[in-house]
C-alpha cells in the first residue's frame, strides 16, 4: 500500500474559492482531469453526466447573466450581493460544471446514475488536487433554478451535480472537524426498526 496515496487521500481539503488565484490548469491538464473524472462506476456504461468548462471571458459573462436573473427574481440587489453574483464564476481560473444527463435504462434507477455523476465530481476534485491545484465543489441557488441552468448551458432535463472551482492556492489550509467513525459506522445487526 502506498503511504503517499493514503496520505494524499487522508489530507484532502476544499480550498475557499475566494482564496484561489491564477494559474489554472493548462489544456492538457484539464484533459487529464476530465479523463480521470470519467473513470467512475457507471452501470451499463451510460455516461449519465457531462462536463461544461467555464473559463476565460465566459466566466464574467455568466456572472452578468446570473446577476440579471437574480434581480429579475428578487428585485434590485444591494451592492455586495450584486458583486457576489457578478463574480460567481470568475473567482477561480476554471470552473467545471458536472451535469447529470438523464439516460433512460430499464434496469438502472435514476439515483444510481446520479451518484455516478457524484463520483465523477469527486474524481475531478481529486485529479485537480493531485496535479497541485486547489478545488472546491459547490452548487448554489442557480443549481435549482431552471432558467439559471439554461443560461449555464444545460438542457431542460439536465441537473447540476456540482460546480468545481479550480485554481492555485498559496498557503496552508486548516483542518476542520471530520465525522467520528464511531458515530457513522456499525456492523450489520438485522433489519432496522420502523
Image (cartoon, rainbow, N blue to C red):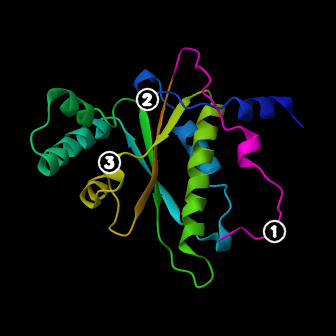
186 or 170, which lies in front?
186
Q: Is residue 98 above or below residue 86?
A: below
Q: Main secondary structure of the magenta part?
A: loop
Bounds of the magenta span? 169-194
Judging by the rendered image, the residue that carries numbered circle 3 is 141
**Quadrant where the N terminus is found in the figure:** top right
Q: Picture coordinates of residue 75 (x, y %)?
A: 10, 45
Residue to which mark 1 is pinned: 190
The picture places residue 129, in percent across and down from the top left corner, at: 61, 32
Mark 3 or mark 1: which comes first in sequence? 3
CA distance for labels 3 and 2: 16 Å
Identify the element where label 1 is drawn: loop
Q: Nearer the viewer, mark 1 or mark 2?
A: 1
The answer to whether residue 188 is above or below residue 51 is below
The quadrant of the rendering that contains the C terminus is bottom right
The answer to whether 19 is drawn above or below residue 93 in the figure is above
In the picture, measured across the screen, residue 114 lies left or right of residue 12, that is left
Q: Position of residue 135 (x, y in %)?
A: 53, 33
Amino acid at each position: 500500500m502506498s503511504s503517499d496515496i493514503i496520505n494524499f487521500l487522508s489530507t484532502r481539503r476544499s480550498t475557499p474559492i475566494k482564496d484561489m488565484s491564477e494559474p489554472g490548469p493548462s489544456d492538457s491538464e484539464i484533459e487529464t482531469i476530465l479523463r480521470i473524472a470519467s473513470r467512475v462506476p457507471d452501470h451499463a456504461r451510460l455516461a449519465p453526466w457531462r462536463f461544461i468548462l467555464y473559463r476565460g471571458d465566459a466566466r464574467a459573462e455568466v456572472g452578468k447573466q446570473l446577476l440579471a436573473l437574480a434581480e429579475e427574481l428578487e428585485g434590485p440587489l444591494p451592492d455586495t450581493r450584486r458583486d457576489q453574483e457578478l463574480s460567481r464564476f470568475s473567482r477561480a481560473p476554471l470552473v467545471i460544471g458536472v451535469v447529470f444527463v438523464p439516460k433512460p435504462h430499464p434496469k438502472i434507477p435514476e439515483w444510481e446514475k446520479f451518484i455516478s455523476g457524484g463520483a465523477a465530481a469527486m474524481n475531478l476534485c481529486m485529479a485537480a488536487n493531485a496535479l497541485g491545484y486547489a478545488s472546491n465543489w459547490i452548487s448554489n441557488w442557480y443549481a435549482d433554478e431552471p432558467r439559471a441552468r439554461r443560461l449555464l448551458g444545460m438542457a431542460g432535463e439536465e441537473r447540476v451535480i456540482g460546480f468545481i472551482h479550480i485554481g492555485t492556492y498559496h498557503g496552508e489550509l486548516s483542518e476542520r472537524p471530520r465525522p467520528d467513525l464511531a458515530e457513522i459506522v456499525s456492523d450489520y445487526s438485522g433489519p432496522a426498526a420502523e
